[in-house]
Image (spheres, rainbow, N blue to C red):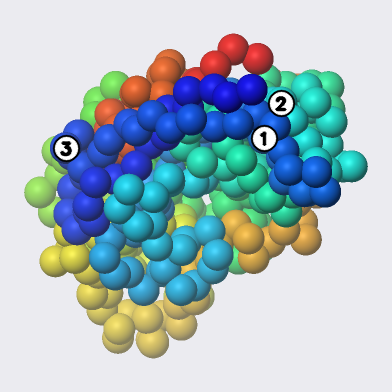
Amino acid sequence: MEVSNKVAVIKNHIEDTPKESHFELKTENLSLSLVPGSDDVIVKNLYISIDPYQINRMKSHSSSQKAIYFAAPITPNQAIDGVAIGKVVASGSPRFQKDDVVVGVFTWAEYSLVKEASIINKLDHSEFPLTYHLGILGFNGLSAYAGFFELCKPKKGEKVFVSAASGSVGSLAAQYAKLFGCYVVGCAGSQKKVELLKHKLGLDDAFNYREETDLKSALKRYFPEGIDIYFDNVGGDMLEAAVDNMNAFGRVAVCGVMSEYTDPGKRAAPDMLNVVYKRLNIRGFLAADFLNIFPDFVSCTSDHLRSGKLQNLEDISSGLDTIPSAFIGLFHGDNIGKKIVKVAEQ
């Protein structure tokens, strides 16, 4: 049996801000029958994770492309892949059966033909909505948890600043910090998001960075006693301003450099005298560095979800044809929380 399968591709490399014209939905025929002896699996995609790091894969060159397998470059007209949740429709692997719900690295398509090794986990009778496993209980949540606890080694009462604090990772890092007993301020790109940070997520304070003409002065205003921990999702001018306001022995967890993905001219140039004389620890990291603590992260986060102490933010659009606009919206601050595209009903 064959099906008509829509697949999302880029027409050409994307060197700056992505546009609708960069993307195309192609239709291909896909056989739902597997070759005897194959360990391949055919998955009908249900939900696709939309993540800003993918822009670096779409460039003709990026230093990230050789760092780890999931950052490998994407060739124009080649199917884009990323973390997704789907239902098995055919399996040559003894590990997976028809109708199993799985999370893994699948193509941005209606159906994906994948190797067994591309499947990360089978989701058996999930206590929480499936989409949680793409965000708060997935790599975004692990990034926030590991970046804050493993790298920053917080102490109760410390002053914590989180940029892009209404995003998929920042919103969780800020909440972990608050639950741990820190003083937490976040920034976001609209007043609506600022109100959400203060009133829904319970941060001590928040500000709209678009309304600030001098970020260094702004952070001095919100942290008159200095910053102990900065959870960085944006890089650029914000990183420079945070370093200027850090306390001695401050820690910076660099999770992303969103402001630099589409504008290389915005590369951060922190005052290195501050780094040296304040003895700052600035560390970049990937969620994949901390797979060893994944069970502890899931257990802790699930407990917070059950108790209602942790709020999950999701932004879900429906239909494979919304992938281009969903991805583009990430770079304009359209989303609140984890951006997901729903491809099909479970």
Most foreground residue, 211 or 133: 133
Q: Residue furthest top?
A: 345
Residue placed furthest toward the left: 213
On the image, which quarter does residue 242 sit in? bottom left
Q: Name the residue under label 1.
A: 42
Dot 2 alpha-carbon crowd within 10 angstroms: few under 14, some 14 to 19, many 20 or more:
some
Asked if disc 2 and disc 1 are in contact, CB closer than 8 Å, the reply is yes
Q: Pinpoint residue 29: horizontal percent, then vertical percent.
A: 48, 30
Please report the residue visible at 47 percent of the width from the left and 37 percent of the height from the top.
108
Q: Would you name the residue on which mark 3 appears?
A: 21
Q: Is residue 47 left or right of residue 21?
A: right
Q: Can residue 170 be seen in this view?
A: no
Which residue is under mark 2? 89
Mark 1 residue element: strand
Please rate how many residues cluster around mark 1, counting C-alpha atoms within 10 Å: few if below 14, some from 14 to 19, many from 20: many
Q: Callout 3: helix, strand or loop?
A: helix
Structural distance between the alpha carbons of marks 2 and 1: 6 Å
Q: In which quarter of the image is the C terminus?
A: top right
Q: Is residue 268 visible?
A: yes
- Secondary structure at numbered mark 2: strand
Q: Which amino acid, mark 1?
A: Ile
Earlier residue among tags 1 and 3: 3
In three-dimensional space, the C-alpha distance between marks 1 and 3, rounded to whole angstroms, equals: 30 Å
On residue 29, the disc is none
User: Does residue 178 appear to the left or right of 9 in the view shown?
Assistant: right
